[in-house]
Image (tube, rainbow, N blue to C red):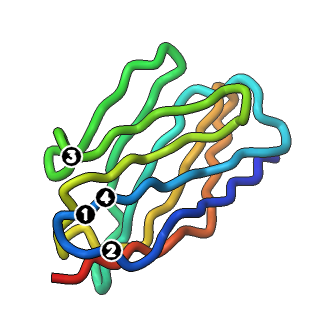
């Protein structure tokens, strides 16, 4: 099993920045992808960004150029740096890890609220 704990959420003004962290523990080996998803109020969960095990990254069009996913292998932590935030970025942000055995793990989420 893999346990994921997100942190860094909170209230931020439009135009501001926030960095989310996701600390992984447990059987964290053979990781295929690490990523972030979000669920805005009253909407479905949506994909935000993914980092592959070769460090390549993909981003949703809505965050491309504003958000950056990165990781610190020594700390088993993945980050999401969010810049130029808008109220449309308000959501619960979830960390996701998938391994090569088909395991798919989620954190409990951290709320980011962007005020206008």
Query: Label 2 near label 4: C-beta < 8 Å?
Result: yes
Q: Nearer the viewer, mark 3 or mark 4?
A: 4
Q: N-terminal of the two: label 3 or label 1? A: 1
Residue 16: which numbered mark, if any? 1
The residue that appears at 56% across and 40% down in the rendered structure is 78
Residue 112 is left or right of residue 24, and the answer is left
> In the structure shown, which secondary structural element does the residue marked by tag 1 occupy?
loop
**Viewer-closest of 71 and 57:** 71
Name the spot of residue 46 as percent of width and height, x first.
32, 60
The local crowd at label 4, few if under 14, some if 14 to 19, many if 20 or more residues have their Cα within 10 Å, is some
Q: N-terminal of the two: label 2 or label 3? A: 2
Q: Which residue is mark 4?
A: 17
Name the spot of residue 69 as percent of width and height, x first.
41, 38
Distance from label 3 to label 4 (Cα)?
9 Å
Residue 86 is left or right of residue 8, and the answer is left
Query: Label 4 near label 3: C-beta < 8 Å?
Result: no
**Viewer-closest of 36 and 87:** 87
Name the spot of residue 17 as percent of width and height, x first.
31, 58
Distance from label 1 to label 2 (Cα)?
6 Å
Distance from label 2 to label 3 (Cα)?
15 Å
Q: Which residue is mark 2?
A: 12
> In the structure shown, which secondary structural element does the residue marked by tag 4 occupy?
loop
Image quarter of residue 68:
top left
The residue that appears at 20% across and 49% down in the rendered structure is 63
Residue 66: which numbered mark, if any? 3
> In the structure shown, which secondary structural element does the residue marked by tag 2 occupy?
strand
Distance from label 1 to label 4 (Cα)?
4 Å
């Amino acid at each position: 099993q893999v346990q994921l704990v997100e942190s860094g959420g909170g209230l931020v003004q439009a135009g501001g920045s926030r960095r989310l962290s996701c600390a992984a523990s447990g059987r964290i080996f053979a990781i295929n992808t690490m990523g972030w998803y979000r669920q805005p109020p009253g909407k479905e969960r949506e994909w935000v960004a993914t980092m592959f095990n070769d460090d390549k990254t993909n981003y949703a069009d809505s965050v491309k150029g504003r958000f950056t996913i990165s990781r610190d292998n020594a700390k088993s932590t993945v980050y999401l740096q969010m810049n130029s935030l808008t109220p449309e970025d308000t959501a619960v942000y979830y960390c996701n890890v998938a391994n090569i055995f088909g395991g798919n793990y989620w954190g409990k989420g951290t709320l980011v609220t962007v005020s206008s």
